Amino acid sequence: MSIHIAAEPGQVAPRVLFPGDPLRAQWIADNHLEQAERYSTVRNMFGFTGTYRGERISVQGSGMGQPSMAIYANELFRDYGVQQLVRVGSCGALTEALKVRDVVLAISAATDSSMNQHRFHGFDYAATADFALLRTAYDAVLARGGTPVVGQVFTSDSFYHPRPELTQHLVDHGVVAVEMEANALYTLAAGYGRRALALCTVSDHIVTGEETTADEREQTFGEMVELALESMLAVPVDE
């Protein structure tokens, strides 16, 4: 039993969906998992385990930002032996090549956070997705008749960034969207020798100002969750 999750041994599945919003975790459990049972209510950061196509799947809220996410990722990897952790969240598009409601498969994540600088004593660490999960997600998009959007994201420590003009330097080097968790998630997964992937739906467009409605976000998030579930099941785990 961990401090912030408090699930009993065996209550968390080896494959975990990882939204930021705990109410989104409940929505996923209610709409995408069968026989889902809640294993944690600590700090109202809900966690559930159910089944999808006969396989055990958990969904755990992570909160917003890398420090909050890292608490739950550490405990899931360390205390519950989680093998696959797939973030299902939102992002802001930084380039007109992306459209609202596109799902970005984050191959890597740049950041303005100092978390990795402390971890690697000032070295720059390239935080990257697990290739097996990325490949299966890519194939799943193709199988659905879509065009996969694979790119580097910017994991920002600030939702309201004081210097938004600085992101243009990132765009000039191929960064396509901004979010708040992927860099630390990829780093922690690598350190534990586990698999992680961030799937992010474009909920708003930084360039054009376009935003999705609440109903549109729910529908698009549902498609992203199904993509994440299909991708995880295609990659074996050791129970």
Image (tube, rainbow, N blue to C red):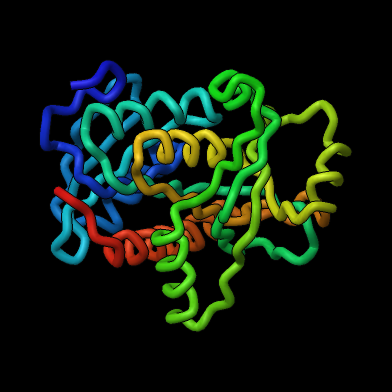
Q: Closer to the camera, 81 or 141? A: 81
Residue 75, horizontal then vertical, whole percent: 31, 27
Question: Of residues 12 and 81, which is closer to you in this image?
Answer: 81
Residue at the extreme right of the image, as rendered: 165
Q: In this view, does 46 lie above or below 173?
A: above
Tell me: 127 left or right of 18. Answer: right
Residue 225 is situated, as x and y percent measured from the top left of the image, at 40, 58
**Position of the N terminus by quadrant:** top left
Quarter occupied by residue 226 = bottom left
107 left or right, relative to 31: right
**What residue appears at the point 71 percent right and 64 percent down from the top-left corner?**
98
* Snapshot quadrant of residue 53: bottom left
How many marks do you count on the picture? 0
State the residue at coordinates (62%, 53%).
203
Q: Nearer the viewer, residue 174 or 159?
A: 174
**As drawn, 32 above or below 14:** below
Residue 94 screen position, x and y as percent: 76, 52
Q: Which of 102 and 187 is in front in this view?
A: 187
The vertical placement of 71 against 174, above or below, is above
| Residue located 56% across and 38% down the image | 183
* Residue 140 image position (x, y, % from top left): 42, 73
Side (left or right) of 8 relative to 141: left
